[in-house]
Amino acid sequence: MVFALLALQLGSLVNPAWACGCGAMVTDRMARIGVDRETSVVQWDGATEQIVMRFTVNGNAARAAWIMPVPSRASVELADADMFDDLATAVRPERRTRHHFWPRGRDWPFTWGERDGFAGAAPGAAGGGVGVVGRERLGDFDVARLTATDPDALRTWLTANGFELPDRLAAEVRPYVDQKWEYVAVRLAPERQGTTLNGTLEPLRIRFASDRLVYPMRLSRLARTPQSLGLYVLADHRMEPVTAIGGDRPEVLFAGRIEPEGALADLTGGRPAFLTALDQRFPDPGRIDGDHELRATAADTPYRRVTYTGRLLTVGDGIPVWLLTVGGVLLAATATIVARRRRGRLRGRGDAGAVPAA
Protein backbone atom coordinates (compact mmCIF):
# COMPACT_ATOMS: atom_id res chain seq x y z
CA MET A 1 0.00 0.00 0.00
CA VAL A 2 1.97 3.60 -0.13
CA PHE A 3 4.78 5.68 0.18
CA ALA A 4 6.93 9.06 0.77
CA LEU A 5 10.67 8.58 0.14
CA LEU A 6 13.30 11.15 1.10
CA ALA A 7 17.05 11.05 0.52
CA LEU A 8 18.74 13.28 3.10
CA GLN A 9 22.19 14.78 2.51
CA LEU A 10 23.78 16.88 5.20
CA GLY A 11 26.37 19.60 4.95
CA SER A 12 27.22 22.75 6.79
CA LEU A 13 24.48 24.72 5.00
CA VAL A 14 21.80 22.02 4.77
CA ASN A 15 18.26 23.05 5.75
CA PRO A 16 17.14 20.88 8.70
CA ALA A 17 13.47 20.64 7.61
CA TRP A 18 12.26 17.96 5.22
CA ALA A 19 8.83 17.16 3.84
CA CYS A 20 7.27 13.75 4.39
CA GLY A 21 3.96 12.99 2.70
CA CYS A 22 1.70 15.18 4.80
CA GLY A 23 3.64 17.38 7.17
CA ALA A 24 7.23 18.41 7.71
CA MET A 25 10.07 16.80 9.67
CA VAL A 26 12.50 19.00 11.59
CA THR A 27 15.62 17.89 13.46
CA ASP A 28 18.80 19.34 14.93
CA ARG A 29 21.14 20.99 12.43
CA MET A 30 23.94 18.54 13.24
CA ALA A 31 21.71 15.46 13.05
CA ARG A 32 19.92 13.78 10.19
CA ILE A 33 16.73 11.78 9.84
CA GLY A 34 15.18 10.23 6.77
CA VAL A 35 11.67 8.91 6.20
CA ASP A 36 12.12 5.70 4.22
CA ARG A 37 8.43 4.95 4.11
CA GLU A 38 5.20 6.60 5.15
CA THR A 39 1.91 4.75 4.98
CA SER A 40 -1.35 6.58 5.63
CA VAL A 41 -4.91 5.42 6.20
CA VAL A 42 -7.71 7.98 5.90
CA GLN A 43 -11.23 7.33 7.20
CA TRP A 44 -14.06 9.81 6.62
CA ASP A 45 -17.77 9.54 7.43
CA GLY A 46 -18.86 12.91 6.10
CA ALA A 47 -18.31 14.81 9.34
CA THR A 48 -15.20 13.42 11.00
CA GLU A 49 -11.87 12.51 9.44
CA GLN A 50 -9.22 10.21 10.85
CA ILE A 51 -5.66 9.85 9.57
CA VAL A 52 -3.47 6.99 10.75
CA MET A 53 0.19 7.41 9.87
CA ARG A 54 3.15 5.10 10.31
CA PHE A 55 6.74 6.18 9.66
CA THR A 56 9.81 4.07 8.97
CA VAL A 57 12.81 6.29 9.68
CA ASN A 58 16.59 6.13 9.71
CA GLY A 59 19.42 8.42 10.64
CA ASN A 60 21.39 9.47 13.70
CA ALA A 61 18.87 11.83 15.27
CA ALA A 62 17.99 11.17 18.89
CA ARG A 63 14.93 13.37 18.51
CA ALA A 64 13.00 15.21 15.83
CA ALA A 65 9.80 17.20 15.40
CA TRP A 66 7.02 16.50 12.94
CA ILE A 67 4.41 19.15 12.11
CA MET A 68 1.06 18.44 10.47
CA PRO A 69 -1.60 21.08 9.72
CA VAL A 70 -5.24 20.15 10.41
CA PRO A 71 -8.41 22.11 9.56
CA SER A 72 -9.90 21.89 13.07
CA ARG A 73 -9.17 20.88 16.66
CA ALA A 74 -7.56 17.43 16.63
CA SER A 75 -7.17 14.56 19.06
CA VAL A 76 -4.13 12.27 18.87
CA GLU A 77 -3.62 8.72 20.11
CA LEU A 78 -1.59 5.65 19.29
CA ALA A 79 -3.09 3.31 16.69
CA ASP A 80 -3.02 -0.45 16.20
CA ALA A 81 -0.34 -1.40 13.66
CA ASP A 82 -2.29 -4.53 12.69
CA MET A 83 -4.57 -2.48 10.46
CA PHE A 84 -1.75 -2.04 7.94
CA ASP A 85 -1.39 -5.81 7.60
CA ASP A 86 -5.17 -6.16 7.23
CA LEU A 87 -5.23 -3.52 4.48
CA ALA A 88 -2.28 -5.06 2.64
CA THR A 89 -4.20 -8.36 2.61
CA ALA A 90 -7.42 -6.71 1.45
CA VAL A 91 -5.83 -5.04 -1.59
CA ARG A 92 -3.67 -7.99 -2.58
CA PRO A 93 -3.90 -8.60 -6.35
CA GLU A 94 -5.99 -11.48 -7.62
CA ARG A 95 -3.85 -14.27 -8.98
CA ARG A 96 -4.79 -16.03 -12.19
CA THR A 97 -3.13 -18.65 -14.37
CA ARG A 98 -2.43 -17.93 -18.03
CA HIS A 99 -1.50 -21.03 -20.09
CA HIS A 100 0.87 -20.97 -23.03
CA PHE A 101 1.31 -23.61 -25.71
CA TRP A 102 4.97 -23.35 -26.67
CA PRO A 103 7.68 -23.76 -23.99
CA ARG A 104 9.33 -20.65 -22.61
CA GLY A 105 12.54 -19.89 -20.75
CA ARG A 106 11.63 -21.80 -17.60
CA ASP A 107 9.87 -24.71 -19.33
CA TRP A 108 11.35 -28.03 -20.43
CA PRO A 109 13.50 -28.50 -22.46
CA PHE A 110 15.10 -25.09 -21.82
CA THR A 111 15.69 -25.86 -18.16
CA TRP A 112 16.17 -29.05 -16.24
CA GLY A 113 14.81 -29.83 -12.80
CA GLU A 114 12.70 -26.67 -12.46
CA ARG A 115 8.96 -26.32 -12.29
CA ASP A 116 7.31 -24.37 -15.08
CA GLY A 117 5.61 -21.00 -14.52
CA PHE A 118 6.60 -17.71 -12.98
CA ALA A 119 5.03 -15.63 -10.23
CA GLY A 120 3.74 -12.14 -10.89
CA ALA A 121 5.08 -9.32 -8.72
CA ALA A 122 2.76 -8.31 -5.95
CA PRO A 123 2.18 -5.62 -6.40
CA GLY A 124 5.06 5.67 7.10
CA ALA A 125 5.33 25.96 27.01
CA ALA A 126 4.74 28.00 23.95
CA GLY A 127 4.13 31.68 23.72
CA GLY A 128 3.77 34.69 21.45
CA GLY A 129 0.94 33.55 19.15
CA VAL A 130 0.89 29.83 19.93
CA GLY A 131 -1.77 28.27 22.07
CA VAL A 132 -1.13 24.77 23.42
CA VAL A 133 -4.54 23.10 23.55
CA GLY A 134 -3.23 19.71 24.59
CA ARG A 135 -0.07 17.78 25.30
CA GLU A 136 0.51 14.12 26.10
CA ARG A 137 3.19 11.44 25.99
CA LEU A 138 2.37 8.53 23.65
CA GLY A 139 5.12 5.92 23.50
CA ASP A 140 8.07 7.52 21.72
CA PHE A 141 6.01 10.62 20.93
CA ASP A 142 5.59 13.86 22.83
CA VAL A 143 2.46 15.26 21.17
CA ALA A 144 1.42 18.92 21.35
CA ARG A 145 -1.74 20.24 19.73
CA LEU A 146 -1.29 23.88 18.79
CA THR A 147 -3.15 26.88 17.48
CA ALA A 148 -1.14 29.56 15.73
CA THR A 149 -2.05 33.02 14.47
CA ASP A 150 1.28 33.59 12.74
CA PRO A 151 3.94 31.35 11.13
CA ASP A 152 6.51 32.70 13.58
CA ALA A 153 4.48 31.12 16.36
CA LEU A 154 5.61 27.70 15.20
CA ARG A 155 9.18 28.92 15.29
CA THR A 156 8.67 29.90 18.93
CA TRP A 157 7.38 26.47 19.87
CA LEU A 158 10.13 24.64 17.98
CA THR A 159 12.82 26.84 19.52
CA ALA A 160 11.45 26.16 22.99
CA ASN A 161 11.78 22.44 22.27
CA GLY A 162 15.31 22.64 20.85
CA PHE A 163 14.56 22.85 17.11
CA GLU A 164 14.68 25.59 14.51
CA LEU A 165 12.12 26.48 11.84
CA PRO A 166 13.65 27.33 8.45
CA ASP A 167 12.32 30.35 6.59
CA ARG A 168 10.98 28.19 3.73
CA LEU A 169 8.81 26.16 6.09
CA ALA A 170 7.55 29.30 7.83
CA ALA A 171 6.46 30.65 4.44
CA GLU A 172 4.72 27.42 3.44
CA VAL A 173 2.54 27.31 6.57
CA ARG A 174 1.20 30.82 5.85
CA PRO A 175 -1.81 29.52 3.82
CA TYR A 176 -2.83 27.34 6.77
CA VAL A 177 -2.59 30.32 9.11
CA ASP A 178 -4.77 32.34 6.75
CA GLN A 179 -7.39 29.55 6.77
CA LYS A 180 -7.21 29.40 10.59
CA TRP A 181 -6.04 25.80 10.60
CA GLU A 182 -4.39 24.32 13.66
CA TYR A 183 -1.34 22.10 14.00
CA VAL A 184 -0.35 18.79 15.46
CA ALA A 185 3.27 19.10 16.54
CA VAL A 186 4.89 15.82 17.50
CA ARG A 187 8.27 15.56 19.17
CA LEU A 188 9.78 12.17 18.40
CA ALA A 189 12.03 11.14 21.27
CA PRO A 190 12.76 7.49 22.18
CA GLU A 191 11.92 6.67 25.79
CA ARG A 192 15.29 4.97 26.26
CA GLN A 193 18.18 7.38 26.62
CA GLY A 194 21.06 7.08 24.17
CA THR A 195 18.98 5.58 21.33
CA THR A 196 18.28 7.10 17.93
CA LEU A 197 15.17 7.19 15.78
CA ASN A 198 15.43 4.14 13.56
CA GLY A 199 13.02 1.57 12.21
CA THR A 200 9.24 1.56 12.11
CA LEU A 201 7.61 3.82 14.67
CA GLU A 202 4.27 3.21 16.33
CA PRO A 203 1.42 4.56 14.20
CA LEU A 204 -0.39 7.72 15.26
CA ARG A 205 -4.14 8.22 14.88
CA ILE A 206 -5.26 11.82 14.36
CA ARG A 207 -8.98 12.68 14.47
CA PHE A 208 -10.62 16.01 13.61
CA ALA A 209 -13.95 17.38 12.37
CA SER A 210 -14.17 18.04 8.63
CA ASP A 211 -17.04 18.35 6.16
CA ARG A 212 -14.69 17.40 3.32
CA LEU A 213 -12.06 14.73 2.95
CA VAL A 214 -8.71 16.51 2.83
CA TYR A 215 -5.18 15.17 3.00
CA PRO A 216 -2.58 17.89 3.75
CA MET A 217 0.16 17.82 1.11
CA ARG A 218 1.31 21.41 0.65
CA LEU A 219 4.39 21.03 2.85
CA SER A 220 5.65 18.20 0.63
CA ARG A 221 6.69 20.86 -1.90
CA LEU A 222 9.71 21.39 0.37
CA ALA A 223 11.11 17.98 -0.55
CA ARG A 224 14.24 17.96 -2.69
CA THR A 225 13.75 14.50 -4.18
CA PRO A 226 10.82 12.87 -6.05
CA GLN A 227 8.01 11.84 -3.70
CA SER A 228 5.58 8.94 -3.68
CA LEU A 229 2.20 8.93 -1.95
CA GLY A 230 0.39 5.76 -0.94
CA LEU A 231 -3.06 6.24 0.53
CA TYR A 232 -5.76 3.91 1.85
CA VAL A 233 -9.14 5.70 1.91
CA LEU A 234 -12.12 4.32 3.85
CA ALA A 235 -15.43 6.06 3.17
CA ASP A 236 -19.02 5.39 2.18
CA HIS A 237 -18.15 5.47 -1.52
CA ARG A 238 -15.22 5.06 -3.89
CA MET A 239 -13.10 8.21 -3.65
CA GLU A 240 -10.81 10.08 -6.05
CA PRO A 241 -8.60 13.20 -5.81
CA VAL A 242 -10.22 16.31 -7.27
CA THR A 243 -6.94 17.26 -8.98
CA ALA A 244 -3.41 15.86 -9.27
CA ILE A 245 -2.07 18.93 -7.31
CA GLY A 246 1.08 19.01 -9.46
CA GLY A 247 1.92 15.30 -9.48
CA ASP A 248 1.39 12.43 -11.90
CA ARG A 249 -2.13 11.15 -12.39
CA PRO A 250 -3.14 9.12 -9.29
CA GLU A 251 -3.34 5.38 -9.92
CA VAL A 252 -6.06 3.23 -8.37
CA LEU A 253 -4.63 0.01 -6.93
CA PHE A 254 -7.86 -1.28 -5.39
CA ALA A 255 -11.50 -0.28 -5.05
CA GLY A 256 -14.13 -2.35 -3.31
CA ARG A 257 -16.47 -2.67 -0.36
CA ILE A 258 -15.07 -4.47 2.67
CA GLU A 259 -16.33 -5.70 6.04
CA PRO A 260 -13.71 -4.33 8.47
CA GLU A 261 -12.52 -6.53 11.31
CA GLY A 262 -10.17 -6.00 14.22
CA ALA A 263 -8.25 -2.71 14.10
CA LEU A 264 -10.04 -1.62 10.92
CA ALA A 265 -13.43 -2.16 12.55
CA ASP A 266 -12.31 0.08 15.39
CA LEU A 267 -11.39 2.76 12.86
CA THR A 268 -14.74 2.58 11.03
CA GLY A 269 -16.90 2.01 14.09
CA GLY A 270 -17.67 -1.51 12.91
CA ARG A 271 -19.50 -0.28 9.80
CA PRO A 272 -18.88 -1.60 6.27
CA ALA A 273 -16.76 0.75 4.18
CA PHE A 274 -15.65 1.28 0.62
CA LEU A 275 -11.87 0.98 0.42
CA THR A 276 -9.95 2.87 -2.24
CA ALA A 277 -6.18 2.38 -2.45
CA LEU A 278 -4.32 5.10 -4.35
CA ASP A 279 -0.75 5.58 -5.47
CA GLN A 280 0.73 8.80 -6.86
CA ARG A 281 4.19 10.02 -7.79
CA PHE A 282 5.50 13.58 -7.59
CA PRO A 283 8.61 13.77 -9.82
CA ASP A 284 8.98 17.49 -9.07
CA PRO A 285 7.68 18.20 -5.53
CA GLY A 286 8.09 21.94 -6.09
CA ARG A 287 5.05 21.80 -8.39
CA ILE A 288 2.72 20.69 -5.60
CA ASP A 289 0.18 23.51 -5.41
CA GLY A 290 -2.14 22.53 -2.58
CA ASP A 291 -3.66 19.82 -0.42
CA HIS A 292 -5.42 16.75 -1.73
CA GLU A 293 -9.20 16.99 -1.55
CA LEU A 294 -11.02 13.76 -2.35
CA ARG A 295 -14.57 13.32 -3.60
CA ALA A 296 -16.90 10.41 -4.35
CA THR A 297 -16.70 9.01 -7.88
CA ALA A 298 -19.76 8.87 -10.14
CA ALA A 299 -20.15 5.15 -9.45
CA ASP A 300 -18.78 2.72 -6.87
CA THR A 301 -17.10 0.60 -9.54
CA PRO A 302 -14.98 -2.15 -7.95
CA TYR A 303 -11.45 -2.76 -9.15
CA ARG A 304 -8.74 -5.26 -8.25
CA ARG A 305 -5.36 -5.73 -9.86
CA VAL A 306 -4.64 -9.09 -11.47
CA THR A 307 -1.27 -10.81 -11.64
CA TYR A 308 -0.80 -13.80 -13.92
CA THR A 309 1.22 -16.94 -13.39
CA GLY A 310 2.39 -18.42 -16.68
CA ARG A 311 1.95 -22.16 -16.95
CA LEU A 312 2.76 -24.54 -19.80
CA LEU A 313 -0.35 -26.24 -21.20
CA THR A 314 -0.22 -29.92 -20.17
CA VAL A 315 -2.44 -33.01 -19.99
CA GLY A 316 -2.46 -36.12 -17.88
CA ASP A 317 0.57 -36.36 -15.61
CA GLY A 318 2.07 -33.08 -16.77
CA ILE A 319 2.78 -34.08 -20.37
CA PRO A 320 3.22 -30.91 -22.48
CA VAL A 321 0.52 -30.54 -25.12
CA TRP A 322 3.07 -29.15 -27.55
CA LEU A 323 5.12 -32.33 -27.21
CA LEU A 324 2.10 -34.52 -27.93
CA THR A 325 1.12 -32.31 -30.84
CA VAL A 326 4.58 -32.26 -32.40
CA GLY A 327 5.00 -35.96 -31.69
CA GLY A 328 1.62 -36.69 -33.27
CA VAL A 329 2.46 -34.66 -36.36
CA LEU A 330 5.83 -36.39 -36.71
CA LEU A 331 4.20 -39.79 -36.21
CA ALA A 332 1.52 -39.02 -38.79
CA ALA A 333 4.12 -37.76 -41.26
CA THR A 334 6.24 -40.88 -40.70
CA ALA A 335 3.22 -43.14 -41.16
CA THR A 336 2.31 -41.35 -44.38
CA ILE A 337 5.84 -41.72 -45.76
CA VAL A 338 5.97 -45.42 -44.82
CA ALA A 339 2.56 -46.04 -46.38
CA ARG A 340 3.55 -44.32 -49.61
CA ARG A 341 6.79 -46.31 -49.85
CA ARG A 342 4.91 -49.53 -49.18
CA ARG A 343 2.37 -48.81 -51.87
CA GLY A 344 5.25 -47.98 -54.23
CA ARG A 345 6.92 -51.34 -53.52
CA LEU A 346 3.68 -53.23 -53.99
CA ARG A 347 3.04 -51.44 -57.29
CA GLY A 348 6.55 -52.29 -58.44
CA ARG A 349 6.07 -55.96 -57.62
CA GLY A 350 2.81 -55.98 -59.50
CA ASP A 351 4.38 -54.52 -62.59
CA ALA A 352 7.24 -57.04 -62.47
CA GLY A 353 4.90 -60.07 -62.32
CA ALA A 354 2.66 -59.08 -65.26
CA VAL A 355 2.72 -61.37 -68.43
CA PRO A 356 3.44 -59.42 -71.63
CA ALA A 357 0.73 -59.64 -74.32
CA ALA A 358 1.39 -61.84 -77.43
Image (tube, rainbow, N blue to C red):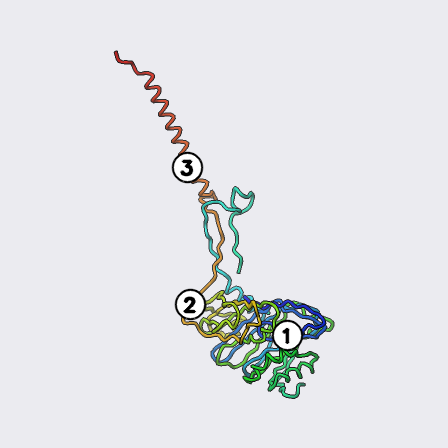
Q: Residue furthest top?
A: 358
State the SS at label 3. Answer: helix
> Residue 28 lies in what quarter of the image?
bottom right
Q: Is residue 79 visible?
A: no
Residue topped by disc 2: 301
Residue 130 versus residue 325 in the image, above or below: below
Residue carrying label 3: 329
Q: CA distance from mark 2 to mark 3?
A: 48 Å
- Tell me, yes or no, whether the two marked residues, 3 and 1, touch with CB atoms within 8 Å: no
Residue 188: x %, y % from top left: 66, 75
Residues at discs 2 and 1 in contact (Cβ within 8 Å): no
> Residue 111: percent from the left, percent from the top?
55, 44
Of badges 2 and 1, the one in the foreground is: 1
Q: Which mark is residue 25?
A: 1
- Residue at disc 2, secondary structure: loop
Residue that lies at the very extreme toward the left in this rendered image: 358
Query: 9 or 22: which is nearer to us?
Result: 9
